[in-house]
Every structure is written in C-alpha cells, then in structure tokens.
Image: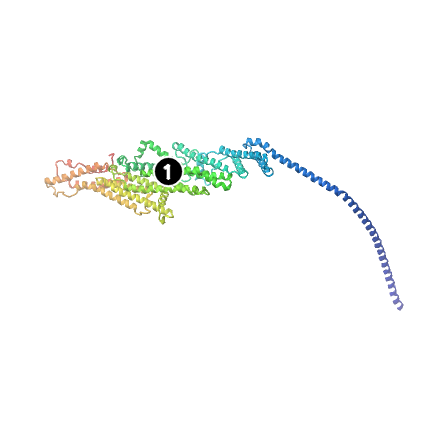
C-alpha cells in the first residue's frame, strides 16, 4: 500500500512534464514561424519602398517635363479665347455701324401690320444709340441712329393715332339704349359690353403705349388719346340725341329709363330702369297752363273763349277745349312734341354719359399708365360733360325767361330732368371720382340752379294765383270752373307726380336749422304747406271773382263748381293725402263750403216759392164769394210763380254744373222743394173760384214744373 501511494504522484508528474514539453515545442515552432514571416515582411517592405522611391523619382521627372507644356497650352487657350472675344466684340461693334442701313426699309415702311418686327428694329436702334453715347459720343453714326430712333418713335406715335382714329367709332344709339336699360323680368341682368376697339387693335395700342412710356419718354400720346376718345364720346351722345329726334316723333317714344315701354325691334328687352315721366302728360299740362298765362294774365283774350270745364267723365278728367286749340294750332303742338322729345332725349343722354364714361375709363385703364389715368379721364370727358351741362343751363335759362313772362309751366320741364339728375347723382359722383373739383362740381351746380329756379317758379305761381285780376270778360258766363282753378289743380297734380323733387326744391331755399337735414318728412311737410298755400290763395281769389257776377245765385254756382272741382280733383289725384299732412280737416272744410254754396243757390228760388206761401192769402169759407181784391191776390201769386219759374228756368238752363252727381242732387232737391210747395198751393186753391180763365193762371201742372227744373243746367235742353 505504501509503495503504491508513492508511485501515483510520480506518474502524474511525468505526464505533466511531457505535456509542458509538448506545449513548449509548439510555442517554439510558432515563434519560429512568426520570425520567418517577419523576415519575409521586412523583405517585402524593403522591396515596396524601393519601388515607391523609384516611382516617385519617375513622377518628378514627368512633372518636370509636363508642367511647362501645360502652362504653354493654357496660355495658348487664353489667347484663343481673347481672340474670339475680340472678334465677337468687333462683329458686335461693326453691327452698330450697320444698324441704320439694316433697319432703314422697315423703319421707312412703318409699323402697320408688323408691329413686333418694327419694335424689334427700334430696339436695335436704341441699343446702337446707347453704344455710341457711351463709347463714341462724337461719332457721326450717333447722330444717324438718333435720327433713325426719333423717326421710328414718330411713326409709332402716328400709328397710335392712326389706329385710334381708324377704329374708334361712336357707339350706336340702339346699343347705348340696351346698355342703359334693364329687364325687370330677368333675375340676373345681362351686362351689355360696349366694345370700343377690336381686341387685336386694342392689344397693338396697348403695346405701343407701353413702349412710348418706357422707351419713348413721351406723354404726348395721352393727349392724342383723350382728344380722339373725347370726340367719340361726344359723338356717341349726340348720335343718341339725333336718334330720338329722328325716330321718336314718327314711331312713338323710345323705351328708356324715362318711359315705361319696350322697343319693338327687341321684344324680349328691356323694361325701363325706373320711370321718370311720361312725355305728353307734362306737355298737356304745359299747354293748359300756357293758355292760362296767355289768356288769364295778360288780358288779351277773355275767358269766355276758353271754357275750362264742360263736363266730367267717369274719371273726373277735364274736358278742355285745349284739344281743339291744339288741332287749330298744329304748329304749336308740333313744337311741344319736339320739346317732349328734347326732354326725354336729355334724360337719356345723362344716363348714357354715365354708362359711356364708365366704359371709357375701363378702356383707358388698359392703355394709360396708372398715375396718369385720372387726369386723362378728366380731360376725356370734359367736352361731352360740358355740352350736357350747357344744355342743362339752357333749360334753366329758358325756364327763367318763361317765368319772367309769367309762364310758370316751364317749371314742369325741370321736374323730370331734376329728378333724374338727383337719382343718378351718386353714380355720377362715383364715375367722376378722382377728377378735378371743377369737374365734380358741375352736376351739383346744375342741380342747384334747377332747384333755385324751380323754387322761384313755385313761389311766383302761388303769388299769381293770389293776384290774378278779377276781369269780368274773363269769367265763365255759365258759372263753370274757372280757368284759374283748373290750371292751378293741374299744376298741383304735376307736383304730386314729382312730390319728392318739388319738396326738395322748396327745402333747398330754406335757411332754418330744421331744414339742414332735408329729410323726406320735412320736404313732404314743406310741399304740403305749399299746396295748402296755393289752395288758400285760389279760394280767396275765387271768392273775389265771384263778386263780379251780379246774380248771387250764379255766384254761388260758380263757387260751388270750383270748390267741388277742387275737392274731387284732390281726392282723385291723392293730393288730399298731401294736403292733410298740414290741414287735417281740409276735406270736410271743402264739403262745408260746397254745402254753403248750395244753400246760397237755393235762396234764389225763394222769389218763386214765396208766391206759394200763405202770406197775404185770403181767408175764406167754402162757397163764399171772393172779393175782387182777394181774387187779385191769388192771381198775383199764380202770375208771380209762373213768371219767376219761367225766368229762373230760362236763366239757369244756361248755367253749368259739370259734376253729374252734384247736378242731379241740386236738381232733385230743388224739384222736391218747388214741387211740394206748388202742389200744396194748388190744393189750397183747388176749390177757389178766382177767375173765369183758370188756364191763364194755372199754366203748369206739377209734373211740368218738375220737368222744367230737370232741365236746369242743360244748355242742350
């Protein structure tokens, strides 16, 4: 056991030793391999270093050989480029010397039909000018190309003028009418485009204008532009005016903002933009008022030749002999028609001016530089605007002269024009925005003039109603409506159609603080006060005129007819609504006046019916014989009644009560009063024997008396 234990450790040590020796051997072999590789690596390194050294040496030799060649080549290339540039510059410079010759034909022939090519030639000439100015300002070539440039610019300006002149045409009147009217039946309105120039021509003009501004340093073309376009604008408006003169009289009033009709040649277009007035209505009123001024104020003719009211129809319109006068004096009627057309034409021309001016500004904005547009536009519209304002001033002057002649109908001419001017003022102001103050003030000045002369006419008309003289020969013999009444009412009815304009006229002359705002309600109250003033003056004058009649009954009929005519006219024309603004009880006041005159008239029959009363009637018993004196009393009563009845019926048959309703009422009332009294009288005398010839005194049966009264106020009976 002991031996065994000693042997085991020995064997382990040997084995371990062998293992270590083997490892050592392997490590030595590895070290030996590494040494061999290191030696090989060193050899390779030495070889590579040798190669690189050799390559470096060769590169240095190559560089020393190539660099001089490269530098020489680079110098040669630079020299070549300089030569090319020099040759190019020489060619470019030489081309400037040939520009005048190269562009001579195109410049001489002008830009017509080849604007782009022409502008290209001008650009070449311009560059030549710049070259010689910078490099050789003393050369003769500079003067040559300068002259050629100026010639080219002149021809461009001439082409600008030529294109504008050749293609600018007045806008046809029918197209203007289409542009200034709208169709109320259409929800979306079609804007009528006013094409002043063909598109291709417009583009050429824009191009030329742009060149002249940028390169031509010239603003003269703007003067050319506004002169040509100003002339066309004025011709367009004059053409519209001539169109009215030629066509309105023969084919009827043309459709327009002033007249609610449609053109026959375009049945689907166009309803009026807004009614202003109906030509002929005002003219008819002017005819009547002129007759009044000629016959009622100057005293040359009597009113008996002009019965203003012979009867009413169902519309209470006056049946006036002015119709006969118009036929008799056809020339005067023709003048009135011409004036109608002139008024309507002027209203159209105002609207047309605004539309055409707006269209001109749109065109101008494409051609004229922005900072010159307002000034050029101001100059462009001056001629047409001045002509319109001059025509308006002439209307004011004519109205002023007419008023001096006491022809107050002239103010009726101003009403439709003034209303139209005021309705279009805001659009007018918008169109003229940016123009000179003198231009903007032209329309307000005209409006002020019209308001001033209109207000003067209104006031003088009211005074003329008050001061119309009481001329016996100017009074209607039949007691019908006086000319003064019919004309005054006719005048006031025209004010109703233009109540806003008339109210503003009166307000424009007010200086009180309450008038500063010129509200619609304030203007309405002023107009109401004015109408009441006229009616008050008329009533006072009629009362004074009625005293001319010797017969108080005829005086009453006269006042009754006039008061009734006034009341019915006020009610029919809705003037009563305006009157009641300041006089609440106007209607009842007139009814009281009418009733008073009826009662006054009925008193004229007292001298007939007084013979039928019991006064002085003898008291007798049936069967008692009357005394001669008592019989004579009854005879006198019959005779007085018969004579009075015959006399009144004969006289009053020639009087007139035009209003059928009033005529029937007065007849029936009088027939009832007289008939009842006569029947009662006959009944009292039925059993009285006062004469051997009763038929001599008992001439009329009650029915015959009633028939005689039924024929009162009937000249045909």
Badge 1 element = helix
The image quadrant that residue 397 belongs to is top left
In the foreground, 347 or 167 = 167
Say whether residue 190 is visible.
Answer: no
Quadrant (top left/top right/bottom left/bottom right) for the N terminus: bottom right
Quadrant (top left/top right/bottom left/bottom right) for the C terminus: top left
Residue 351 in picture, x, y percent from top left: 42, 39
Classify 213 as above or below 109. below
Q: Which residue is mark 1?
A: 395
In the foreground, 479 or 85 = 85
Residue farthest toward the bottom in the current orientation of the protein: 2
Residue 238 vs residue 661: left or right? Answer: right
- Label 1 Cα neighbours within 10 Å, binned few <14 / some 14-19 / many ≥20: some
Residue 47 in picture, x, y percent from top left: 82, 49
The image quadrant that residue 458 belongs to is top left
Residue farthest toward the right in the current orientation of the protein: 3
Residue 234 vs residue 206: left or right? Answer: left
Residue 645 in picture, x, y percent from top left: 19, 38
Residue 698 vs residue 456: left or right? Answer: left
Residue at 83% in and 53% down: 38
Residue 330 in picture, x, y percent from top left: 33, 31
């Amino acid at each position: 056991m002991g031996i065994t234990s000693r042997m085991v450790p020995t064997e382990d040590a040997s084995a371990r030793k062998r293992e270590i020796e083997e490892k050592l051997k392997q490590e030595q072999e590895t070290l030996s391999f590494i040494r061999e590789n290191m030696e090989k690596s060193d050899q390779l390194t030495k070889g590579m270093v040798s190669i690189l050294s050799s390559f470096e040496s060769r590169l240095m030799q190559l560089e020393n050989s190539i660099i001089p060649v490269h530098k020489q080549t680079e110098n040669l290339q630079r020299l070549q480029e300089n030569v090319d540039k020099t040759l190019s510059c020489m060619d470019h410079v030489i081309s400037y010397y040939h520009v005048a010759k190269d562009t001579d034909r195109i410049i001489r022939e002008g830009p017509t039909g080849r604007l782009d090519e022409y502008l290209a030639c001008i650009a070449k000439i311009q560059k030549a000018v710049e070259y010689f100015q910078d490099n050789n300002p003393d050369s003769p070539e500079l003067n040559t190309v300068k002259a050629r440039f100026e010639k080219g610019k002149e021809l461009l300006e001439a082409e600008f003028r030529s294109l504008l002149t050749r293609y600018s045409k007045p806008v046809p009147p029918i197209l203007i009418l289409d542009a200034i009217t709208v169709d109320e039946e259409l929800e979306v309105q079609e804007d009528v485009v006013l094409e002043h120039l063909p598109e291709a021509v417009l583009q050429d003009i824009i191009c030329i204008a742009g060149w002249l501004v940028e390169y031509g340093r010239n603003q003269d073309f703007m003067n050319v532009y506004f002169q040509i376009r100003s002339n066309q604008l004025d011709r367009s408006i004059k053409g519209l005016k001539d169109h009215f003169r030629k066509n309105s009289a023969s084919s009827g009033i043309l459709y327009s903002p002033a007249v609610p009709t449609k053109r026959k040649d375009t049945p689907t277009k166009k309803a009026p933009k807004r009614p202003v007035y109906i030509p002929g209505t005002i003219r008819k009123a002017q005819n009547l008022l002129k007759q009044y001024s000629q016959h009622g104020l100057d005293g040359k003719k009597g009113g008996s030749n002009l019965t203003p009211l012979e009867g009413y129809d169902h519309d209470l319109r006056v049946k006036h002999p002015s119709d006969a006068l118009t036929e008799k004096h056809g020339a005067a009627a023709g003048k009135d028609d011409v004036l109608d057309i002139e008024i309507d034409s002027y209203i159209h021309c105002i609207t047309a001016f605004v539309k055409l001016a707006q269209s001109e500004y749109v065109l101008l904005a494409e051609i004229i530089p922005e900072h010159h547009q307002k000034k050029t536009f101001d100059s462009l519209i001056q001629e047409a605007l001045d002509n319109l304002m001059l025509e308006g001033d002439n209307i004011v002057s004519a109205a002023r002269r007419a008023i001096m002649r006491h022809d107050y109908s002239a103010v009726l001419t101003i009403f439709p024009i003034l209303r139209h001017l005021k309705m279009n003022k805001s659009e007018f102001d918008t169109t003229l925005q940016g123009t000179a103050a003198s231009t903007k003030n032209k329309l307000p000045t005209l409006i002020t003039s019209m308001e001033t002369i209109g207000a003067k006419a209104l006031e003088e008309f009211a005074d003329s109603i008050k001061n119309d003289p009481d001329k016996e020969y100017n009074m209607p013999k039949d007691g019908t409506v006086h000319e003064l009444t019919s004309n005054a009412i006719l005048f006031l009815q025209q004010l109703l159609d233009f109540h806003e304009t008339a109210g503003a006229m009166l307000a424009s002359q007010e200086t009180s603080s309450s008038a500063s705002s010129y509200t619609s309600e304030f203007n309405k109250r002023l107009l109401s006060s004015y109408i009441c003033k006229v009616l008050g003056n008329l009533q006072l004058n009629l009362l004074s005129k009625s005293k001319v009649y010797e017969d108080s009954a005829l005086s009453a009929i006269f006042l009754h007819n006039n008061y009734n005519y006034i009341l019915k006219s006020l009610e029919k024309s809705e003037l009563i609504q305006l009157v009641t603004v300041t006089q609440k009880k106007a209607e009842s006041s007139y009814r009281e006046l009418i009733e008073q005159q009826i009662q006054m008239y009925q008193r004229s029959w007292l001298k007939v019916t007084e013979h039928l009363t019991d006064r002085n009637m003898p008291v007798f018993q049936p069967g008692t014989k009357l005394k001669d004196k008592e019989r004579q009393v009854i005879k006198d009563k019959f005779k007085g009644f018969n004579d009075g009845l015959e006399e009144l019926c004969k006289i009053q048959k020639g009087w007139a009560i035009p209003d059928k309703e009033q005529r029937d009422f007065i007849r029936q009332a009088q027939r009832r009063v007289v008939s009842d009294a006569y029947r009662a009288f006959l009944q009292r005398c039925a059993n009285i024997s006062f004469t051997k010839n009763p038929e001599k005194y008992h001439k009329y049966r009650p029915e015959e008396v009633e028939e005689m009264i039924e024929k009162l106020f009937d000249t045909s009976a």
